[in-house]
Amino acid sequence: MTDHTPHSSPTMGQPGIVSAALFGLCPRCGAKGLFAGVAHFAPRCEKCGLDFGAFNVGDGPAAFLTFGVGALAAGVAAWLALDVDPPVWVYVAVLVPLVVLPTLYGLRVSKAALMAAEFQRRAAEAGAKDVDSR
């Protein structure tokens, strides 16, 4: 695993979790370029060389986004059906962007926040030395 510690003081040049998440900044040096795709991390930071693959962010944020965005979309769909009763194409025109855009941006923000939190807390997988051998 790549060394997660910064080269200077502990917070020198590091963005906060919120800044890193909202703007896709490297958790070590603050350079833009955390993502190589819509919600896919770049292999490493082009400025400081931090290996983004060493972090285990996973797909946890997707579950929470599914519930939140799904509830919002269901509420809007129910309101449209009960109050407006539009044709089907209106549902598609309203609900597709309402689901896709917050989900994609939410994935970026939540994955970046988890990575920044892991970096700041020096999170790593437990090894044999971390397990109590009684």
Image (cartoon, rainbow, N blue to C red):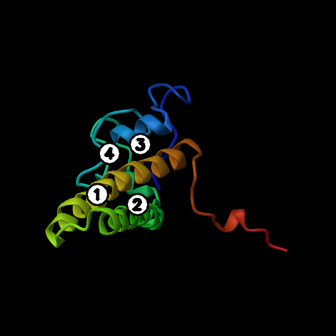
- Neighbor class of circle 2 (other Cα within 10 Å; few <14, some 14-19, many 20+) is some
Local secondary structure at mark 1: helix
- Cβ atoms under marks 2 and 1 closer than 8 Å: yes
Residue 113 percent across, percent down from the top left: 46, 47
For discs 1 and 3, the disc positioned in front in the rendered view: 1
Residue at 35% x, 36% y is 48
Q: Earlier in the sequence, mark 4 or mark 1?
A: 4
**Cα distance, mark 4 to mark 2?**
28 Å
- Neighbor class of circle 3 (other Cα within 10 Å; few <14, some 14-19, many 20+) is many
97 is higher (above) or lower (below) than 59:
above
Residue 82 percent across, percent down from the top left: 34, 68
For discs 2 and 3, the disc positioned in front in the rendered view: 2
For discs 4 and 1, the disc positioned in front in the rendered view: 1
**Cα distance, mark 2 to mark 1?**
8 Å
**Cα distance, mark 1 to mark 3?**
21 Å
Q: Earlier in the sequence, mark 2 or mark 1?
A: 2
Residue identified by numbered label 3: 21
Local secondary structure at mark 2: helix
Residue identified by numbered label 4: 34
Q: Amino acid at mark 1?
A: Leu
Closer to us: 80 or 92? 80
Q: Amino acid at mark 2?
A: Leu
Q: Is residue 119 visible?
A: yes
Q: Amino acid at mark 3?
A: Ala
Residue identified by numbered label 2: 72
Residue identified by numbered label 1: 98
Q: In the picture provided, is 26 more to the left or to the right than 46?
A: right
Residue 18 percent across, percent down from the top left: 47, 38
Closer to us: 66 or 130? 66
**Cα distance, mark 2 to mark 3?**
22 Å
**Cα distance, mark 4 to mark 3?**
9 Å
Local secondary structure at mark 3: helix
